[in-house]
């Protein structure tokens, strides 16, 4: 502690040079960054949504709802309270209300997730993943990390953009990975300054840290987050060298990097298991 500031020191080797970094963070910035992500509890959303659906059904007439098989509340069934067979008009009205409630359910979930700072992704294997809205965290973290990024870039003293990318990637890779990698619901996710404070982060956290550092130091560099099964990577729209792995996203070629590689890997190099996914474009992505 120096004047209530948290001081961080790192020493590592990159570009065949020994690099030393030192910077300080204001506790207020650390706290602001820590409060950026709320805990998403799916059962709480389910309870709130179910109450609202039941209320809307009862207000529309003598209706009630039952969840689908296995208590699946996302595939509910609307019932008319009448014991007598329904007329065609009543059946049509019931079907219209069912569709209206289903649309409301989808909109409610999307709005709830956005309010909590989360996003819903469709992975390449058709699994739906609910995770932290990483692009939003990057945008909101820029003010908190601006001083760190400026100090680090000055201390690296690199000559060009490619060297800066390599040095920052090496630094983030050397931060230990969280021992309980779990992206679902963001249980182990930490915003950028918290990764530095805790000196550990899961793959999504380290990817967001690197993306925030790059966005702060190279503002116009197009970036993309890649969501592979059980892993998150970063892609950068920079020229790739021979043998370096790239991915084409909406007509733009991106160089792929792994901020959570178990050992330092240069840009464009991945472990074989991750490389197979990227080569086959078995991934989801968000452009930044």
Image (cartoon, rainbow, N blue to C red):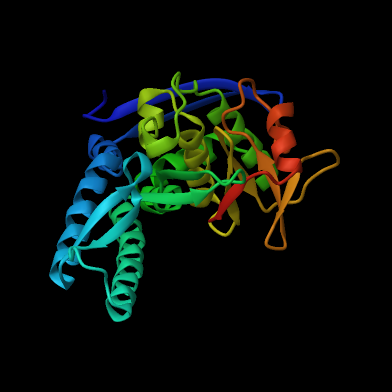
Q: Considering depth in this image, is 75 or 150 the residue closer to the camera?
A: 75
Q: In the figure, 29 relative to 99: above or below?
A: above
Residue lying at 33% horizontally and 52% vertically, measured from the top left:
113
- Residue 41 visible to an observer of this rendering: no
Q: Considering depth in this image, is 206 or 95 the residue closer to the camera?
A: 95
Of all residues, the one furthest to the bottom in this rendering is 89
Drawn side of residue 79 relative to residue 179, left or right: left
Drawn side of residue 195 relative to residue 238, left or right: left
The answer to which image quadrant residue 167 occupies is: top right
Of all residues, the one furthest to the right in this rendering is 242
**Image position, residue 41 (x, y; %):** 27, 39
Drawn side of residue 224 relative to residue 179, left or right: right
Residue lying at 39% horizontally and 48% vertically, measured from the top left:
137
**Image position, residue 63 (x, y; %):** 19, 64
Q: In the figure, 215 relative to 261: above or below?
A: below
Residue lying at 47% horizontally and 39% vertically, measured from the top left:
209
Total labels: the figure holds 0
């Amino acid at each position: 502690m120096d004047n209530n500031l948290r001081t961080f020191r790192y020493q590592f080797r990159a570009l065949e040079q020994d690099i030393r970094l030192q910077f300080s963070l204001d506790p207020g910035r650390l706290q602001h960054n820590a409060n950026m992500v709320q805990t998403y509890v799916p059962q709480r959303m389910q309870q709130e949504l179910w109450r609202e659906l039941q209320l809307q059904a009862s207000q529309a007439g003598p209706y009630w709802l039952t969840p689908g098989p296995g208590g699946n509340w996302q595939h509910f069934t609307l019932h008319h309270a009448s014991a007598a067979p329904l007329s065609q008009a009543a059946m049509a009205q019931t079907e219209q209300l069912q569709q209206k409630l289903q649309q409301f359910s989808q909109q409610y979930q999307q709005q709830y997730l956005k309010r909590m700072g989360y996003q819903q992704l469709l992975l390449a294997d058709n699994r739906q993943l609910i995770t932290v809205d990483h692009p939003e965290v990057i945008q909101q973290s820029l003010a908190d990390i601006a001083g760190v990024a400026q100090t680090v870039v000055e201390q690296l003293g690199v000559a060009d953009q490619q060297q800066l990318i390599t040095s920052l990637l090496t630094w983030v890779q050397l931060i230990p990975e969280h021992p309980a990698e779990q992206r679902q619901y963001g249980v182990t996710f930490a915003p950028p300054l918290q990764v530095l404070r805790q000196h550990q982060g899961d793959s999504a956290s380290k990817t967001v840290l690197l993306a925030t550092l790059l966005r702060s130091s190279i503002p116009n560099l197009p970036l993309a987050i890649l969501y592979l099964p059980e892993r998150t990577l970063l892609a950068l729209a920079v020229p790739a060298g021979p043998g370096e792995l790239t991915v084409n996203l909406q007509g733009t070629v991106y160089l792929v990097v792994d901020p959570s590689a178990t050992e330092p890997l240069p840009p464009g190099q991945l472990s074989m298991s991750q490389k197979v996914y990227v080569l086959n474009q078995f991934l989801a992505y968000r452009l930044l």
